[in-house]
Each structure stands twice: as structure tokens, then as C-alpha cells.
Image (tube, rainbow, N blue to C red):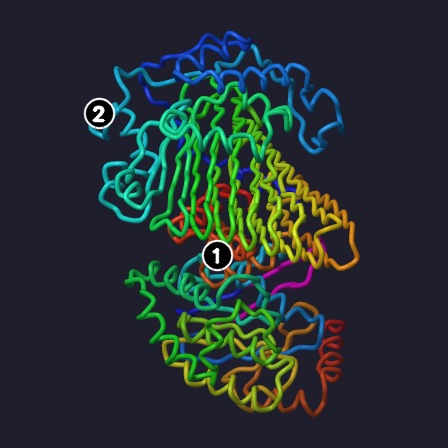
Amino acid sequence: MSAETTELESLANQEYKYGWTTDIEQDSAPPGLDEGTVRFISAKKEEPEWLLEWRLHAYRNWLKMTDPTQVPGSEQWVMAEYPEIDYQDIIYYSAPKKKKAPKSLDEVDPELLRTYEKLGIPLEEQKMLAGVAVDAVFDSVSVATTFKEKLSEMGVIFCSFSEAVKDHPDLVKHYLGSVVPHNDNYFAALNSAVFSDGSFVYIPKGVRCPMELSTYFRINAANTGQFERTLIVADEDSYVSYLEGCTAPMRDENQLHAAVVELVTLDNAQIKYSTVQNWYPGDKDGKGGIYNFVTKRGACRGANSKISWTQVETGSAITWKYPSCILQGDHSVGEFYSVAVTNNRQQADTGTKMIHLGKNTRSVIISKGISAGRGQNTYRGGVQVLKGARNARNFTQCDSMLIGDQCGAHTFPYIDIRNTTSQVEHEATTSKIGEDQIFYCNQRGIDTEEAVSLIVNGFCKEVLSELPMEFAVEAQKLLGISLEGSVG
Amino acid sequence: MALLEIKNLHASVEGTEILKGVDLSVNVGEIHAIMGPNGSGKSTLAQVLSGNEAYEVTDGSVTFDGKDLLDLEADERAKAGLFMAFQYPVEIPGVNSAYFMRTALNEVRKHRGEEELDAVGFLSLARERMALVEMPEDFLKRQVNEAFSGGEKKRHEIFQMAMLEPRLAILDETDSGLDIDALRIVSEGVNQLHSPDKAVIVVTHYQRLLEYIVPDFVHVILNGRIVTSGDKHLALRLEEEGYDKIRAEHEEQAISA
């Protein structure tokens, strides 16, 4: 067995293919965080007074809060271990230097555009390709948004957060912080104080957004934290599918990514939010990598509305996120489909919270955790059914797969039901990837790496099938790459 | 030159020696039956030949088509044209049977320098080969071996063999758990696939299968060694006398030697 284990480990030495950096001039704030930093960011972005006040409010709250790592158990963090973060050592604002805001792609730094080409999202081509509109966030600022014109004809607003603050201040003011309050948790408060950019989407009444909207995030500059903020509002009877992808260069230091995503659906509206997260996971000994501490939450405010989260998490040294749904509207539906892979020294503590408030609300949770190498994978999920949520239903299925004998899988379901008419089901399984399954594939001419990818993709099928087509293909490949070398 | 040449093969699992010096030579065009009681090592031989790493080869040599078989990984052996029909085919949840088969077939075709098949080409070939084992088409939509009955699993194995067209097929107790109709279907499939440039090794406990797949040679394996070989009549004799008589004879030989 020991030879096998060694091979398992050697297989785990996967190369991170997005590890290059882009050599462009950066306009950065000095490292460190105080009120001055918050004012600096706000001023850089020429923000209105109310937003500066909001940020300062968040900052003052953050000062009073405690880093969850310092008080074990206070904010449920038990399954991840990492050294204390020095918040004074992080650069909170970093932007590619430019003369003016680009009006079209032609004005965007060609070096930047090449970066996106390397990432496989050629913006130039995107212009022509119908189907996906991309907002690309590079470190702290949004670089270019494609398809803006076509979308605006339908009344769809899809722009960087900064632009939204300038052009649609009423919408932003109305919804910002309405789902994730600025004092929600330590990292949400930090984000609220220093967020630099992100995406904003508004789908007007009765509009079915004709294309997938997509944001691509990349952390480029060293010692930079990325604090983006996404706000998506789907007005009555509207629909939008939103995709989010992320990568970062390989660096020996850990980088912090603390994003906030807020979704709101009104009556009969639907948001489908898909993430493929491939931040740099660190090397095989756990050096470097992104700390991915993200707060994502959606509010189904309207009756019959629906929010569906699908995530494929393969990157980051540590992932801590629980995309959740607050089911306020009667008959509203929340869904969470997740694949989380941890290899080498990666740690993931992820899951969801479904909070049932309205009558006849329904939620589905399908979570697939895959641990390889010395990876630790935790599912943490909360299902809360309040008194008024009559006839609420939840179904949770939580499956873990172990590859090798040095990794771990953990499941923490929290269920809290306050009425007698609701129904909650929870199923959980843990399995080891079978040597016999791999041998069966081998015996048909399929090599071990391909076999692992095949078996893992089969394991994750229910989740992958929720992804839009082009994303599903990418996610399948990514699963294979992430687990390359994890079985001998 | 023989297609498969096994010399003095020793193999053990978790430190226990199971194969204790097997010699066997198989030429193209031949069908060999390996018979033996439970625990004699006949399935181990099949597993070792197909490259299951749970078994450790401690001595001896095996050449396949002139190449050192033991030097190849399991998938390389399959690509080189060695196929084993599993006694207990495993389930692979969530993996579509057609996708699995096409992946395997294209790996093998690539290795042979043949063009990979697209979905359309694959499907028409699959339909033709499924007919051989009277498999309904909806098999392809199901997940690999999941919720297959015992008989369906065995037919599925022979279907895969028909798709991959191996030079050497090893059938590991393919008859176990089959009713008489399924046994006939599976055997007819094997017979139709057999040709002068291919060879088959049938590993079985019972003579019953050999009424359908008629062997050119029958070998009896006892305690990790082939103790006697003959033609199809040997199988009939075994059926009548059981393994005890051969075992007794063999022990006598061992004592007198």
C-alpha cells in the first residue's frame, strides 16, 4: 500500500496553468488599512458622500469585530488552519495605470487584453460571439464590459460596480447591503469598507436576459487583496444566468480574496449564478495560494422567485463560503449545487444556508466533496425553517469522495425546524475512489488519470449538469487537472 | 510464435503465494479453457495477466505478441489487445455507458493508429455489436453497470469485447450467475467474434459453458499450477469425476517425485 500512497502523492503534483503575471504599471495604495485608506479608495473612485459614509461605517464595525481565527468557534471555522493574517500588510487598492477610463476595447491596454486571451477569454472575439457578455475584473478595477450596448437596448444593466454607482446610484443605494449587511461578518465588513470594484446587474421587469452574463476575476499584483462586490437584481418576471470565473498568478505569499455577492429576486424572477473558482491553490507543500473568504447570499424577496447557486471550487489554499438563500417570498425556491475539490494541502469549508420564511418554500442542496492528497474538505450546511414557513421542504444530499488515505472529509448539517408542516430530508455518503473502478477502466484501455477524471465527473454529474454548457466543459477539464496525479 | 507465452509464473496477493509456477502457451486461432476448483488460482491468473496491481508477480515471464507483458501497465495491455471479461464487473455511478465505451474504444483506436470515432460513427458500430449479445439500445443510456442484473453485466462485458476487438480475450467465470438463455447468448457472441487471428481463454469452474464455447485445449489448475492438459474430453471427465480424482493423482505424483 505504501508504494500506492507515494504514487498517489506524486500524482497530486499538478501544475497550475494560470500562474503567470502580467507586466503592467500598477496604480496602488500603500499597504495598510486605516480610515485614510477607505477615504483614498472612495476618492479614487469619485464616489458620492453616502457611499463613503457607508464604507466608513463598515470599517468602524470591522474594527470592533474579531478575526474568526482568533476566537475559535465564534464564527465556525473549525476545519481550517492558517497563520494569522496581517491586515496592515495588504494592498487594498491596485489598478492598472491608464490615462482615462476606456470607452471601448480599443482603448484597453493591449497587455491586459493579452492576459485575458491567456485565460481563454479573448474579449476581442467575445465581441463577435453571441452568447456571453463578459465583465473582466483585474485586481481592483473592471477593465471592459462587452456587449453592453446590445444589453442596454433591452434595458439590462450590466456594468462595473463603479459605473453603477455613477450611473445608477438609486438602484445601488437601494439594494447595496440589503442582503449582506455591512456588519454581517468579519470579512463582509472588511469588504464593505474597502471593496474596489465588481459587477452590477439589473434585469428589468419581464425581461429574460438573452445571453449568459459573465465576470472574470484575476488577481495580478503582488500582496494585493481582492475585494470585489457583485450585486444582481432581477425585477419581477425576469431571468438571468450569471457566470463567474477566477484565476491568480502563483506567488509564495498568501493572497486574500474577500468578496461579497448579493442577489435579489422579486416576484417570479429567477437568478442562476454559476461559479468556477480556480484561484491559485498554493504548491504541494501548502506554500502560497489564495485565501478565498467570500460571503454570497441571495434573497428571494418575491413570490415564486428562484435563486440557484452552482459552484465548482477547485482552487484556493483555503475556501470559506456558503452561498445561501433567504426564501422570503411564498413558493420561492432556493438551490445549491456544489463540487469542491481539495488536493495537496488545500482546505475547503463550504456549503450553504437555506432560510425558509415564506409558505411552501422549497430548497435543494446537492454537495459533492472530493478530497485528495492531504486536502481537507468540509461541508457545512444550515437548513432553517421558521414558524411561518408552512409546508416548507428541503432535500439535502451530501456526498464525499476520498482519494488516498491522507485526506479528510467532514460533514456538519445544522437543521432547525420551527413548525410541524415542513419536511426536511438529509442524505449523506462517504466513499473511497475504488481501486477496482480504476482497474476496470484501465482494463478497457483508459489510463489512470483519465479514469480518475471519468469517475470523479460521474460522481459530480448532478452538479455539473446544472452548469451552462460551455462552463460545464471547462469544469470537467478542471476537475481532471486538479486531481492529476492523485492516484497511482 | 505463440500469441501468449507464460513461463513459470509465480504471483502472490498480500504476501500469500497463489500462482506457483504456471506454464501456458496460447496460439492465435485457439480457444483454451482453464478449469479448477475454487481457490486453485484460475481467477488470479486472469487478474495477473490483465495487470491488476493488487497481485504481485514474484517470478516467471509472460510475453504477449512478442512483448514483455509484465512490463506494461494495465491500460497498455488493453491497448495492445488483451481483454478480460470481469467475473464481477464494477459499477461506475454517474458515468454514461456510451461515453465510457467510446472513451475506451477511442483510446484503443488511437493506439492502433486508427481514426477516433465521432458520436455518429460510434453509435452505428455500437448498434451492430449490441445485436450480437441481444442487448437493447437503452443500455447505452444507462450508467456503467449500475442497476444491471447479473446477466446484463455479463452481456455488457461481451459487448465491450465486441467493440474493442481484442487479440486475446480472457473470460473470467463469465458463466457464473447466468441462466441458460443468457449463457447461450453470451456464448454465441463469443463464438461469432472468434477468428483465426484471435485467441480466447475461458476460465471456468463448470463444464457447462464449454458445451457452447468448445475449447481446443483444456487445462486443469490445482494449487497454483497447471497439473494436466488435454482436449475437450478432459472437461467432460472432470464433470463426471469431479476435481478430487485429479487432485489425488496429482498429490501422488507430487509425493513420488
Q: Magenta part mainly helix, strand or loop?
A: strand
Q: Going by the picture, which residue comes out furthest to the left?
A: A106
Q: Is residue A430 left or right of residue A476?
A: right
Q: Which residue is mark 1?
A: A465
Alpha-carbon span between mark 2 and mark 1: 38 Å
Which corner quadrant holds the C terminus of chain B?
bottom right
Circles 2 and 1, Cβ within 8 Å, touching? The answer is no
Residue positioned 37% across, 49% down in the render: A209
Residue positioned 75% across, 82% down in the render: B244
Magenta stretch bounds: B7-25
Q: Position of residue A109 (x, y in %)?
A: 25, 23
Whether residue A37 can be seen here: yes
Residue positioned 50% across, 57% down in the render: B74
Above or below, A195 relative to A347? above
Callout 2 crowding tier (Cα within 10 Å): few <14, some 14–19, many ≥20 = few
Q: Which residue is mark 2?
A: A107
